[in-house]
Amino acid sequence: MKLSRRSLLRSALGAGAAGAATATLGLPWLASTASAGPDLSARRFVMLTLGHSIMPEAGMYAWLPPAGPFGTLPRLLQPLSGFADRMAIVGGLDNLVPSLVSSNGHNASSRTLLNCLPHAEALNPDGTLIAPGIELDHTSQGGGPSIDYVMADALGTVPFGLRAGPRNGEHFRNFRLDGTADRGEPDPRVAFDRLFASTMEPAMRTDAERLAARRADVLRTVEQNHRAMSGRVGAEDRVRLESHANLVRDLVDELDRVVTITCDSPSLNVPSGFPSEVEDNDARADDLLVPTHNSLIAAALSCNAARVVSLHYSAMQRNQFPFLNGGADMFPADGWHAVVHHDAGTDEERYTAMGWYFDMVADLLRKLEAIPEGDGNLLDNTIVLVTSSLGNSAHSTHNLPFLLFGGSNSGLRTGQTIDYRDSTRRPHADMWTTCLNLMGVPATEFGWNRGDDRGRPFNVGPLDELMA
Amino acid sequence: MRHLGLALLLTGCIGVVTDPGTDPDGPSGANCDAPPALTGESQRLDPDELAHALEDALGYRPDVDGMPAPLASHGFSTAPSANVISFDDTRAIAEVADRIALDARGRYDAFLPCAAANIDRACVQTFLSTFVPRLYRGAQGPDDEARLLALYDTLRGGDDPLEPGLALAGVLSAALQSPGFLYLLEIGQPDGDGVRRLTGREVANRLAFVLWDAPPDEALLAAAASGELDTPEGRRAQAERLLGSPNARVPVTRFFREWFGVHRADPGDQVDPALAQAMLEEFTRTVEHRVFDAGAGGLPSLLGGTTTFVNRSLAMHYGLAEVPADDETWVEVTLEDGRRAGLLGSAIVSSAHSNISETAIIRRGHWVREALLCDELGTPPPGATDRQPASAPDATPRERSELRGEVSGCAHCHTQMDPIGLGMEDLDPLGRLRDTYASGRPIDATGEVMGVTDGQFTGVEELGQLLSRDQALTQCGSAQWFRFAMGREVGSACHGGWATEAVEASGGDLRELLLRLVESDSFVLRADPREG
């Protein structure tokens, strides 16, 4: 079915121009307007987030080299050594927002990481906190949009969200403009179709794709049906059906959005052995899934199908990494959650497993770097940010890890560690303010801006030291 | 005051539990002389219910996998707050509807008035005239068929005109995304000042979805048409018939899964998926057995009894001596340990109210208090977790609880929760008996339900007995059944009064409790939806 049609597309196109070990992309060379000065319109933003801290050794920040220009990178970051001159690492950024809400260690850290706001249920209509507080749990809605939505909206586009792993309510972090969770698309094949459906010749489409291509027509009728029914029901139901109708309208708007795909015939090569069902994936095939996601991200950015991308590594409980262990589960007794929280496993095992995530970051960087653009390559025009919702294995949201990558046109000051623990620690909202500015969106603050957390402000301003 | 039993003795953190029938300053200040009409809040159907509704309209049961299930942040999936639809849900519904519609193309000959090869506009129009009322369960408006027919015309045109069968699939997809299908709509007819009465068809719909998770069958539709459902006796007769069918097991066990919070449990993150599945099935089998198979009994029977059902995975999990040959083989066993009993002793209940790798005495205590005793505690104040005093790394939950008790502002609520959770500590996060913590320190599973005479207990077996005293569990359970079945908060003082009366009239008999609800005015009256 779908898979075979893609194979057909691929063989029709021949081998892809950009490639990596398990996935290839057939992408035409993208002409760019890049010139000597910074070209903000060419900049893209990719955000990779992990669910737990990235600290293999108890009591040490293995991801955080000493402040100043990089020397030899720490062992954990060795997979990224080829990108040291494109990398900046920032320490001493604290997520202070969880102090406003009651929650467990994962719900609060995840749901405030990217929007810096208490959850929706804790807020009055005027945006103030409800006292004495509504507990944040794994079904809570976001108190407002996450950075990817804010940024994309300001740039006149919509973000493109992927996830690798199951839909885990404790770890939701991306929120739409209305605060509903964007759980990310787990299947790169589905995401590919969604992004590039308009480039398919009708004759090449399956019936399902032909019907999907008419979805806006179908949804316009659905919206009318909701509006008509809402006129017949009571006040409470009217609110409900109208809000449902509005979401249908949003979906139509997204489908109607004019995106000029700048590639003639994009394709996505899916490696053999790729799981047929991704939604319930238990992360045992992440060695196939994540590189395919990375290929898709490269294609989406390169072909102008997306400018702001988020990938959430959501499998954070039972990850077994059999692909690092000769096919056998690495943590059969406990799973990754217990290992990362130091209840189980050894430092060596933590290094091996966590190192894989950095291998995957390097895989994405290589794929971006392999796509020519203007006088350079796609990575030159891209900011890749890696972070986690936790700063250590005890659910602290202080000293969150931030690794950023970019090239000559990223606006980043790379090749160095900036550690705000050495001076004045900063709220992590400042990182999102910085990223907005780097993308050409003027901003002085982000998220919660009322009061303080035991004397510390929730916003200070852009991180000047990080910007070139 | 007799009818309030034990609950009256309990004080919540945010207010005092009062007699709902007589308190003039009750939550709504309601005048109980007025008919107890419920607010007009239709509920979104869950995927199983949608599958049954499709089966009724199409003649076969399609795969609805991927259809977003209602899930409330608190309470039941039938609560109005569970109706909230997200953007992702809207897209998921569109994708699932397309899939079902495309699959239906292979079966057109079974339900179309024309041959699949000869589909034309007239055929589609004739089909819609019977299909839409059936799919929308009588809630169709005057132009619903016309709009769908117009969509057929649209899809037949355009840059890539769809052939008739594919265009009809688009029409089916639209119908499956429409409110008449997705929601259990109750519009009613005017019935006096500010009140509307459900039509016979709407009563039939609610009866069937509450007791069967499915639309009405022909006998129920006939009862609706004849006016039989307008009387309490008529509704009761039909409800008894529905309850006597195996179909009733699904929604009734669903009620118990949601009441006990196990529908939120996700042990699959921590244990083998086969075991996680078995844990949930043990719960369902136990409920089915005690409610439907073991004869008349009250709610307390669910918290007592040392028999349960295990397959191979679960028997090994519990460390039982006799292990069935495989996971398909389920056997009834008696737990000999004398410490576990009833649903509180099941692995899935432990898992549902624990953290991932450790138990959570506060969560367990909070849940018992709110879900099983209907004692509203509210939520912790912001920054509550920051106020937990530091303790040694190997401090036991009891020691940490004692430290909390010394912090100003924490003790009032935590003395109501912590001692309950402490008494359940001999069950680990996955419901296995244990005598020591991972640190090697011994577990002391003595607990107390504060505010209750002789409230001390040790372990869940004694806790179950305690909760069953003085009809406390039955009283709360009937209110929970009202919330689940009607998809609303008990809210109004008058509805709370209904629960009290129902407990007295039923003598605590579970089946009778279910039936009392359909006889009540609350079942058929709604506040006038035109207002506001």
Image (cartoon, coloured by chain):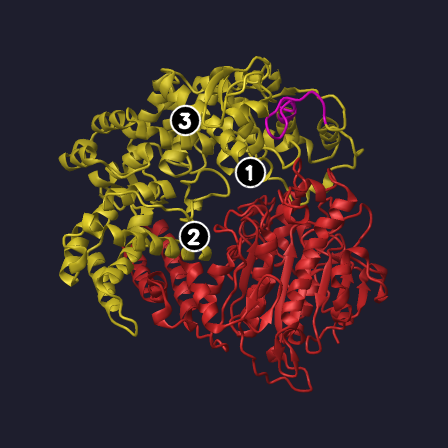
Chain colours: A red, B yellow
Q: Which residue is mark 1?
A: B268
Q: On the image, which quarter does residue B239 sit in?
A: top left
Number of the label disc, if any, that sits on residue B85: 2
Whether discs 1 and 3 lie on one chain: the answer is yes
Front tag of 1 and 3:
1
Whole-number angstrom distance, CA of label 3 to CA of label 2: 29 Å
Tag 1: Cα neighbours inside 10 Å, few (<14), some, or many (≥20)?
some
Magenta stretch mostly in which secondary structure?
Answer: loop
Q: Earlier in the sequence, mark 2 or mark 1?
A: 2
Marked residue nearer the N-terminal end (1 or 3): 1
The amino acid on which the numbered mark 2 sits, given as a three-letter code, is Ile
Viewer can see residue A6: yes
**Label 2: element kind:** loop
Badge 3: chain ID: B
The residue nearer to you, when weighing A112 against B308, is B308
Residue pictured at 71% horizontal, 44% vertical = A340
Cα distance between the residues tagged 1 and 3: 31 Å
Element carrying mark 1:
helix
Please, what secondary structure does the residue beneath circle 3 have? helix
Q: Position of residue A433 (x, y in %)?
A: 67, 67
Q: Chain of mark 1?
A: B
Q: From the viewer's perspective, is residue B432 above or below residue A322?
A: above
Alpha-carbon span between mark 2 and mark 1? 26 Å
User: Nearest the camera: A445 or A6?
Assistant: A6
Magenta stretch: give its range: B421-437
Q: Is residue B397 left or right of residue A118?
A: right
Residue A125 position, x and y percent, is 52, 56
What residue is drawn where x is 66% and y is 63%? A363
Residue A36 appears left or right of A215: right
Image position, residue A362 (x, y; %): 69, 63
Q: Which residue is mark 3?
A: B478
| Residue at x 43%, y 53% (from the top left corner) | B89
